Amino acid sequence: MLIKNILILFLVACVGQSAEKLKIGLVLDKGGKEDKSFNSAAYQGATLAEKELGIELKYVEATDVNSIENLHRQFAKKKFDLIIGIGFAQQEAVKKVAAQNPDVKFAIVDGEVSAANVRSLLFEEHQGSFLAGYLAAMKSKTKKVGYIGGMDIPMIRRFATGYSAGVKHFDKSFTIVENYIGITADSWNNPAKAKELALNQYQQGVDVIFVAAGASGSGVFDAAEEKKHLAIGVDSNQNWMKPGFILTSMLKRVDTAVYTTIKDLQNGQFTSGVVRYGLKDKGVDLAMDKHNEKLVSADDIKKLEKIKTDIIAQKITVPDFYLQKKK
Amino acid sequence: MSEIDILSLSFILSVLRVSTPLIFAAQAGLLSEKSGVVQIALEGFMLVGAFSAAVFAHYTKSSHLGFLMAFGCGAVFSLLFSLLVVRFKTDAIVAGTGFNFLMAGLIPFLTKFLFNSTGSTPSIPVEQRLSFEVTVFAILVVFAIYAMMTKTRWGYWIQFAGEYPDGLTACGVSVNKVRWVSILLCGGIAALGGASLSLFLSSAYSPLMTGGRGFIALSALILGKWKPVPTLIGCLVFGTFEALQIRLQGVPINGVVIPVQWIQILPYVLTIILLAGFFGRSQAPAYLGKR
C-alpha cells in the first residue's frame, strides 16, 4: 500500500513537472555552439525561447556522426516535448527516432523528413547567396571573386551556384574561384586549412571571398585581415568578428526558425511538413550593421533592395543546385 | 597556367606553413619511438599544445609566452602517458588511444569552465599572431635533435633504449629513466606543433583542430625511416601534397578539372603506398613496442 502511494505520488510529481514547462532538446552539429555561424544561430534562437517563452532547454553537441542517433534517442527516452536536430547530417537519425517515438515532436534544420511528428525547416540559401554574390561583384576591383565551402555537399554547392549567379548577374566577365575545405565533417572545424585556401585565392588576385564553412570561416577572416582584403560571412551575423574586413554576412535565420517552431508548439500550432524560409520572409538576408556601414553605402543597399524585390517577384530566377541536379 | 606556378615564392611559403605542425610532431614522435615507445598519442599532445597556447596567449597577451607554455603543458601531460606506459607497462597503443580520447574530452570541459564555450577559445589579435619564426624554430629543433642523437651521450642512450635496452641496463643506465625523458621531450615538442596550429596557422583553438595531423606526422616519420633529417623531408613531402591540393582545387589542367575529392585523397594514398613498403625496407627501432 505504502509503495503504491509512493508510486502514485511519484507519477503525479512527474506529470506536474511536465505540465509546467515544455522540455526542448537541441542537438547541435559538429561545428558546435561556438562556431559563431550556423550552430550559434540555432543556439541563440533556442536560448531566446528559453528566456521569453519559459521553456526548459537542454542542448548537446554531436561530436561525430555516429553519436547523433543516440543523442536524439536519449532526449526521446526522457520524454522531451520537442527535439530539434541542427544540420543535414541529422536527417537519417531524426527519421528513425521520430518513427519510433510518434508521441514526441521533432524538427530538423536543413533536412527533409516526412512524418506526422516532424517539421522540416529549409532555407533558400541560393537566394541569399545570389545577393552576396552581387554585392561581392560590386566591391571587387580585380573582377575576381572567391568562394570557400566547408564540406563538399549539395547544400554547400547550392550556396556556390547562387553566389556565382549573383556575380555573373552583375557582370558576366567576372571569374569565380571555388574551393572546398574537405569531404569529411572535419571540414567545419579546420580554420588552418580554410586560411590556407583563402591566402591562395587572394594571391591569385581574388579580393572578395564568400565563405560557407561553419567554424572554419574564422581562418578566412584571419587571411582577409592579414592581406587587407574582404570576406563575406555566413549563417549568423559575423560582421563584428573583423570589422572593416567583413563586407557582410549572408544570414540564414536558423534562430528565427528554431524560435518560431518552439513558439508554435507552445501555442498548440505545431504542424509537420516543410517550412521554407527565403528572402520573402527574411529567412535569408544580408547583414547590415555598424560594423560594415563604411563598406556598404546607402546607394549599394538601394541596388541590393532592387535585386531583392526582383527575386521575390520572380523577375530574376536564381539557379538552384538541388533542381539542377535532377535534370 | 599561372595559378599552378609550383616554384613561386607563395607556393613555397604555403608548403612551409602547412608543414610546420607536422615537423614538430614528427620529431616528437621520433624521440619517443627511438627510445622504444610506440607513439600514437601525438594527436593528443598536439591538442594540448594548441589549446594551452591559445589560452595562455589570450590571458597573457603574448603569443611567445603562449608558445612556451604549450611546451610546458605538453611535457606535463606526457608524465601521465609515461606513468602508464613506462611505469605500469601498459600497451602503448592502448594508452595512446586512450590519451587521445582523454584530451579530446578534457579540453571542452576546460573551455566550458574558462570561457563558457564548448571547446573553442577567443581569437588572438592579428598583431600578436606568430609567423615564420615558428617554422625556423621547427627546423632548428630538427637539427638540435640530429645533433643530440649523433653527438651526445643522451642521444646514444635513447637509441639504445629502442634498439637494445638490455645493453643499456648492463651499462648501469636505467632504461625507464631514458624513456621518461624522451617522452617528456616528445610531449613538449608535439605540443609546439599544436601551438603552431592555433597561433600561426589560425588564431584560436577550435575543437579537434588537429584533424589527424598527428597521424600524418607519424607517416612522415615512417617515410623518414626514423632519422631526423629524412623525417623533416618526409614532412615537407606531405606539406607539398597538401599545398598542391589547395592550389589545384578547381584549376583546369589542359582543360580538365580534376575533382577536388581526387586531389584530397592524394596524401592518404601516398601514406598507404609508403606503409606498404614501396620505398625500401622500413627501419624501425628493433625494440619498438616490445616490453
Image (spheres, rainbow, N blue to C red):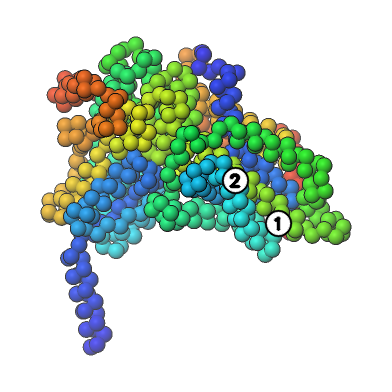
Instruction: Read off the residue under disc 1.
Output: B180
Q: Residue at x 21, y 79 (%)?
A: A8
Per the image, label 1 sits on a secondary structure element best described as helix
Task: Kindly identify the amino acid type of the residue bearing the numbered disc 1.
Answer: Trp
Q: Does the image show residue B71? A: yes
Residue type of the residue flagged with mark 2 = Leu
User: With respect to residue A129, does B182 lie above or below?
Assistant: below
| Left/right of residue A203 with respect to residue A102 in the rendered view | right
In percent of width and height, residue B282 lies at 73, 40
Q: Establish if A107 lies above or below A238.
A: below
How many residues crowd around disc 1 within 10 Å: few (fewer than 14), some, or many (20 or more)? Answer: many
Q: Nearer the viewer, residue A174 or B109?
A: B109
In percent of the image, x 33 and y 41: which residue is there? A38
- Chain bearing mark 2: B
Can you tell which mark lies on residue B68? 2
Where the C terminus of chain A falls, by quadrant? top left
Q: Which mark is residue A173?
A: none
Q: Nearer the viewer, mark 2 or mark 1?
A: 2
Question: Is A232 placed left or right of B98 in the picture?
Answer: left
The part of the image, by quadrant, that contains residue A235 is top left
Q: Is residue B282 left or right of residue B188?
A: right
Q: Position of residue B263 (x, y in %)?
A: 52, 28
| Pointer 2 and pointer 1 on the same chain | yes
Looking at the picture, how far across and down is residue B166, in whole percent? 83, 58
Whether residue B234 is situated above or below residue B109 in the rendered picture: above
Look at 30% across and 38% down and name the residue there. A236
Disc 2 versus disc 1: distance between alpha carbons? Answer: 20 Å
